[in-house]
């Protein structure tokens, strides 16, 4: 079976890439071919001089301050970080199509915050409103992040999810919200992040040996 995954697999973010890797690896372990569906990575990684020219004077000043005060002092470390993320993506997630007309037997939407209005807006690709053609659409542990929707948002969400065969979400508040809809409640379930679909043995296949021999504490600061 040819399975397409619509998720945030291109972001230089640990959570985004690892959840994409886990879901792809798990589906492949069941004997299916998996293709990542993407319409935006090339746009995001390409500098757009027209956007710069159209920005306001205040926005230009803010960008220059960011450039000189934050980015340039960390340039070498940031470049090394970007190279590491791209190396991982090319090695494990590079089976990607930009053809939104490609035919799939199944499309899985999620995980990660693909339905977040704050991060990306309501992207029609990630809601299944546009994109690859298939009779079978499901979500897996899809997230909206902070649940902040108005009446128009709810109408869009309801119309989009009606075409899904099954709906799996990650957070309890979105799960409870969808349960309140009589047309969707039988399709909805809650699942944990796809990183937990893989065992520690499977994760150890891609983890480098520990280079720290003494006891240590790992502190991960989201900001």
Image: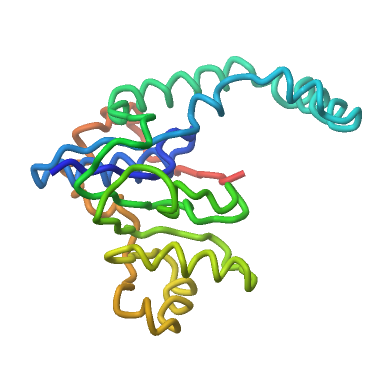
Q: Position of residue 199 (x, y in %)?
A: 18, 49
Q: Residue furthest top?
A: 76
Q: Quadrant of residue 70?
A: top right
Residue 213 appears in which quarter of the rendering?
top left
| Vertical relation: 114 (above or below) 70 | below
For image coordinates 30% across by 58% down, the residue present is: 138
Q: Position of residue 108 (x, y in %)?
A: 30, 51
* Total tally of numbered discs in the picture: 0
Q: Horizontally, is 135 left or right of 141 in the view?
A: left
Q: Quadrant of the N terminus?
A: top left
Who is closer to the viewer here, 156 or 37?
Answer: 156
Position of 187 with respect to 75 (left or right) is left
Q: Position of residue 13 (x, y in %)?
A: 48, 37
Q: Quick check: 158 left or right of 198?
A: right
Q: Residue at x 31, y 26 (%)?
A: 94
Residue at left 61%, top 68%? 149
Please, is residue 30 above or below residue 139 in the view?
Answer: above
- Which residue, as the protein is rendered here, is positioned at the far right? 57
Residue placed most toward the observer, 44 or 63:
44
Q: Quadrant of the C terminus?
A: top right
Q: Position of residue 194 (x, y in %)?
A: 30, 53
Q: Residue at x 43, y 47 (%)?
A: 130
Height in image: 223 above or below 159? above
Q: Is residue 140 left or right of residue 30?
A: right
* Residue furthest out toward the left: 31
């Amino acid at each position: 079976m040819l399975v397409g995954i619509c998720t945030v697999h291109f972001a230089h973010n640990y959570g985004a890439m690892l959840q994409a890797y886990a879901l792809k690896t798990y589906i492949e372990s069941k004997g299916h071919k998996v293709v990542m569906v993407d319409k935006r990575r090339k746009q995001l990684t390409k500098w757009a001089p027209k956007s710069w020219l159209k920005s306001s004077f205040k926005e230009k000043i803010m960008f220059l301050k960011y450039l000189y005060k934050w980015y340039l002092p960390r340039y070498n470390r940031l470049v090394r970080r970007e190279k590491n993320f791209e190396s991982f993506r090319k090695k494990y997630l590079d089976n990607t199509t930009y053809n939104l007309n490609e035919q799939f037997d199944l499309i899985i939407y999620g995980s990660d915050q693909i339905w977040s209005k704050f991060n990306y807006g309501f992207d029609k690709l990630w809601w299944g409103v546009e994109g690859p053609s298939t009779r079978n659409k499901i979500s897996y542990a899809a997230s909206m992040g902070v649940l902040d929707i108005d009446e128009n948002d709810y109408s869009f969400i309801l119309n989009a999810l009606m075409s899904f065969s099954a709906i799996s979400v990650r957070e309890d508040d979105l799960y409870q919200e969808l349960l309140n809809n009589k047309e969707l409640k039988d399709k909805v379930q809650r699942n944990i992040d796809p990183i937990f679909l893989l065992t520690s043995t499977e994760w150890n296949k891609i983890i480098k040996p520990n280079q720290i021999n003494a006891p240590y504490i790992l502190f991960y600061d989201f900001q």
